[in-house]
Amino acid sequence: MNIYSNHIQALNHPIQMKEKQNQMDRSTDFAQVLKSTIEKVNNAQLLSDTKTEALAKGKIEHLHDVMITAQKASIALETTVQIQRKVIDAYNEIMRMQV
């Protein structure tokens, strides 16, 4: 029996390695998506600041363009904060679960 169990473990080893690699890939994918999303929100904020400053200096004449950009940045930031709150709430709920 011991010989067979060693063979089974040897056969399962590549499968276990593949599963660990998949988990690492998923966490890397999540980290990349999170980083990318935060960068997009930051870029929207920076664009809004740039257009607002240009409007104040008289370089932009279209107020509506500045206001739309500012509103988009505001909505993006608010959405990000709401998602952050939901993730923290979910984490806290998981931590309260009894196993």
Image (tube, rainbow, N blue to C red):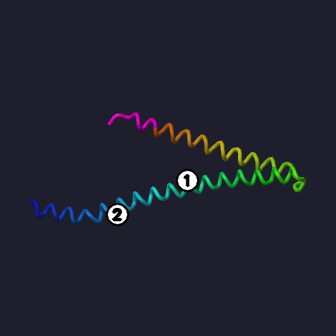
Residue at the image point whose x is 65% and y is 42% from the top: 78
What main secondary structure does the magenta stretch of the protein show?
helix
**Could you tell me the amino acid type at mark 1?**
Leu
Which label sits in the foreground, 2 or 1? Answer: 1
Q: Tag count in the figure? A: 2
Question: Residue tagged by mark 2?
Answer: 18
- In this image, 17 relative to 45: left or right? left
Instruction: Check residue 58 for magenta coloring.
Output: no
Q: Which residues are magenta?
A: 92-99
Residue at the image point whose x is 61% and y is 42% from the top: 81
Element type where label 1 sits in the image: helix
Element type where label 2 sits in the image: helix
In the picture, which quadrant includes the N terminus? Answer: bottom left
Instruction: Check residue 95 for magenta coloring.
Output: yes
x then y, percent, for residue 40: 65, 55
Question: Residue tagged by mark 1?
Answer: 34
